Amino acid sequence: MGRAEFGRLLRAARQRSLLTLESLAETSGVSVRAISDMERGQSLPRQATLSELMDALDLDEDERRRFVEASARRAGRSAGRVPRQLPPGLAAFRGRADALATAYGLTAQAARAEGGHVVVAVIGGMAGVGKTTLAVHWAHQVADRFPDGQLYVNLRGFEDATRPMDPAEALGGFLAALGVSDLDMPRGTEERSALFRERTASRRLIVVLDNARDEEQVRPLLPAATGCLTVVTSRSQLSGLVAVEGATPVGLDVWTREEALSALAARIGEERCRAEPEAAAALVERCGHLALAVAIVAAQVSATPQLPLRTVVRELSGTGPLLDALSAGARRSDVRAVFSWSYRALPPETAVFFRHLALHPGPSVSAEAAASLAGVGMREARRMLRQLSAVNLLSRDAEGRHVLHDLVRAYGVELVEQEKDDGLAARIRLLDYLRHNADIANRFLGPASTAEAVPPAEGVVSVALGTREEALDWFRQEETSVSSALRSMNDPRLLRIGMTLTQDWVGYYSVMGRWSEEIATKRIGLDAAQRLDEPAAVVRNAAALARALAETGRTDEADRYVELMLGQLDRIGPVERAFAERTVGWVRGRQKRHEEALHHARRALEIYRTLGDDRSTAREMNAVAWYLALLGRYEETIALCEEAVPLLQRDGNLRIEAAAWDTMGYARQHLGRLDGAIADYRESLRVYGEAFDGYNQAEVLDHLATAQREKGDHAGARASWLRAADLLSAIHSPRAERMRANAEASRGHGDLL
């Protein structure tokens, strides 16, 4: 159904654009055969291919959405179980015969799982020499020998715009691709690395670790299976991997003269090179035989088929000195001259767009983020992205996002500085794009916000989101952008919008159970709040940090932020004070310091009552009641919950009402009033059901089962635990197995786990 629908859409769009199969193939870079197969419903595109087709067809936003929906329906989430993360390969790959011979020998060794050790290759060389191109080409060529898929990550080891990627972040992406849910994702690098080795132990995978900084960044990412092939690229030698892990070094230098000429001819045509052999040789010499430089010059030459090669050589000879970004002072090619020549050929508006694009701090950029950076509309942005791709100043990753080589990015930043522009306006638009759309997306992830959405600044793209899945897809698309943007937020003029941005993104991390990302993000928000000396913001960020740390068992560390909140009480208003006291009570409850929890919850309740805030009062009454129950004061618990429930029902606060019924059930059960407890638990289940809260329903079912067992109803207890297990399995919670074990134990009236 999905393939047929996508094929129909593709054929209709091509015919509307008056394109033949051949002309669409030429424009998009996708083969005629592949397009024909898609139109006939025999296949569907990868994300990068889909993006190329949509750009070539110049679709509007509604049409693009239909294309994406049609392609997404066929795969479902199970596609992530066999990851296909490689960026597109290079059709005009040439040379590297010696390196490929070594590569294919290592491939055979990994495919046969020879030697009893993991096969790791380290491709080393200077910037722009073609390390990534070789790694990706190699991986595509041998992918069929590794049926469990391919993993790829850009570790950002040498990008000036952002820090190297934390191994924990890379592992999070790998584990998600291997089917690990957000709820089951471990917090730290060591735990994630151990789970990664476990998940890859019986698989045959290719793992490409691109642009690595050092051995310490790479080691946690190495699979343990002898049937896996790991390819690492780096400007460093990574001799530690060779010495300790037995990695095989594959050194790359610039092309030979013959290889460079072959690559040029593959891109611009053999005839042009044969017609001007001396100019062709001079041209690749001017490029220093560097792969990146040859590719960029060739793309520009291909766009001007009437331009003599000798004219290109003359124009390149008149440009400026070397680009300092080349690694280790290896000034073997005039890269800036190549970039400058290609840049000056751009239309003026595309040149401005390119400068803005260079300010993006992440490894890849979506079309929407690029448009926001430049302050242009989506149609204009897509047109200019195509122009930059056509001249090889831009490439695409496996998800269809746009990638700037870090040397190209460095050149673009130089241009911005030459224009005496600090890029502040563009950076603000990028942060506002991430803030505004996160605010909209959050409305699909939890209870609807009562606050009115703050409109975006002029020039910022507002993404059309209509469902929870679309909201989650947008968050996933921009995760690397927001992470990089927040970590590069050094300008004090960006502190306020950056602090707001952390608040909008922490909701996504919280919903997905991404505690480590939530904690890292809130640390940035707290730092901004402290630098701005805004006590209310300090309290909000410290509260979020304390909760996340306590949630992940780091209760001692949470104390630091509890003290920070309490130290701000004299500087904030009553609403913020109540919020701070309520949070401190929650953290103390997690720390099992129940007397302190009760003390702070009562102080919050007193403030809410003084403010006349009935909704917050009723919610806090349940918190106080729960701490009373934990202290064994069950009659007080029941009385307070009975007072709170009518208020909660009046306000339609379903989750807290359900929690209050659960609290009453807990108190009655401990008083031995089992019939009343079971009735309370069943009412809690009903209300949580109205709130579509399966996780908390499972919690209540666990409580109900214990009361049923205590009453002697073992069949009822077993049914409750099995229902809880089903609910927890639906959200991939590891607690589901404990519920099933309890159910099985109840069959024989055995001991429970």
Image: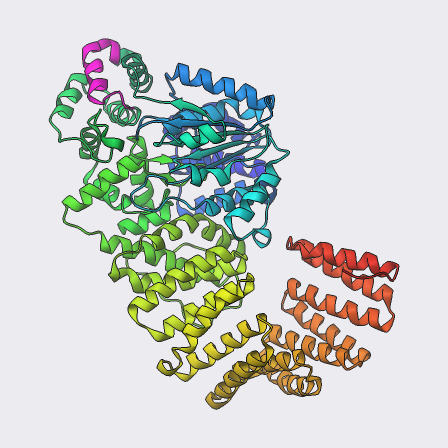
Image quadrant where residue 238 sits = top left
Q: Could you say which is closer to the camera, residue 307 or residue 409? A: 409
Q: Is residue 470 left or right of residue 530?
A: right
Residue at the image point whose x is 45% and y is 51% from the top: 474
Q: Quadrant of the C terminus?
A: bottom right
Residue 352, horizontal then vertical, whole percent: 21, 44
Vertically, is 277 above or below 14? above
Image quadrant where residue 728 sits = bottom right
Residue 4, horizontal then vertical, whole percent: 58, 36
Residue 608, horizontal then vertical, whole percent: 49, 85
Q: Could you say which is closer to the camera, residue 139 or residue 564? A: 564
Q: Is residue 70 left or right of residue 340?
A: right
Vertically, is 677 above or below 436? below
Q: Is residue 459 left or right of residue 687?
A: left
Vertically, is 226 above or below 619? above
Residue 605, horizontal then vertical, whole percent: 53, 85
Image quadrant where residue 366 sits = top left
Asked if residue 1 shows in the view, the reply is no
Q: Residue furthest bottom?
A: 610
Q: Quadrant of the N terminus?
A: top right
Number of disc labels: 0
Q: Could you say which is closer to the camera, residue 115 or residue 743? A: 115
Q: State the extent of the magenta-drawn residues as a range.
A: 273-290
Asked if residue 412 shows in the view, the reply is yes
Q: Which secondary structure class fits the magenta region best? A: helix
Q: Could you say which is closer to the camera, residue 354 or residue 736? A: 736
Taking the magenta stretch, the answer to whether it contains residue 618 is: no
